[in-house]
Image (tube, rainbow, N blue to C red):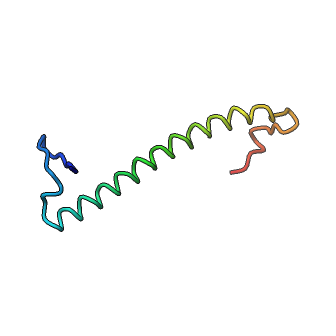
């Protein structure tokens, strides 16, 4: 049984009209993609943190610029 909950009520999506069932399937697909994108974002954020930490190994005084030398 595929369930849809709205306003504290649960509906059996298989008992909806064909258009309602199609809409439910689309909604389920979209929600799966949102969940996957959120997982990807978590992975990307963790990777950025790790790469910032790794970058510290490569920073040298030779690469240091003065504030008045920075590009706009």
* Image location of residue 63, percent across then percent down: 84, 39
In the displayed structure, 41 sits above or below 13; it is: above
- Residue at position x 13%, y 49% in the image: 11
Seen as rendered, the residue at the extreme bottom is 19
The mark tally for this picture is: 0
Expressed as whole percent of the image width and height from the top left, the position of residue 45 reads 55, 40
Q: Position of residue 4 (x, y in %)?
A: 19, 49
Residue in the picture at 18% in, 45% down = 5
Residue at left 30%, top 54%?
A: 28
Q: Position of residue 71 (x, y in %)?
A: 72, 50
Q: Is residue 49 left or right of residue 56?
A: left
Residue 26, located in which quarter of the rendered image? Answer: bottom left
Of residues 18 and 27, the one drawn nearer to the viewer in this rendering: 18
Of the pair 43 and 71, the residue shown nearer to us:
43
Residue 10 position by quadrant = top left
Q: Is residue 40 above or below residue 23?
A: above
In the displayed structure, does residue 43 sit left or right of residue 58?
Answer: left
Q: Is residue 15 above or below residue 61?
A: below
Which residue is farthest right? 62
Please report the residue visible at 74 percent of the width from the left and 45 percent of the height from the top: 70
Q: Nearer the viewer, residue 15 or 62?
A: 15
- Left or right of residue 24: residue 59: right
On screen, residue 67 versus residue 31, left or right, reads right
Q: Nearer the viewer, residue 71 or 57?
A: 57
């Amino acid at each position: 049984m595929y369930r849809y909950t709205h306003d504290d009520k649960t509906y059996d999506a298989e008992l909806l009209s064909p258009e309602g069932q199609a809409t439910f399937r689309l909604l389920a697909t979209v929600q799966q993609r949102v969940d996957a994108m959120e997982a990807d974002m978590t992975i990307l954020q963790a990777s950025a943190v790790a790469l910032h930490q790794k970058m510290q190994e490569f920073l040298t005084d030779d690469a240091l610029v003065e504030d008045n030398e920075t590009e706009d």
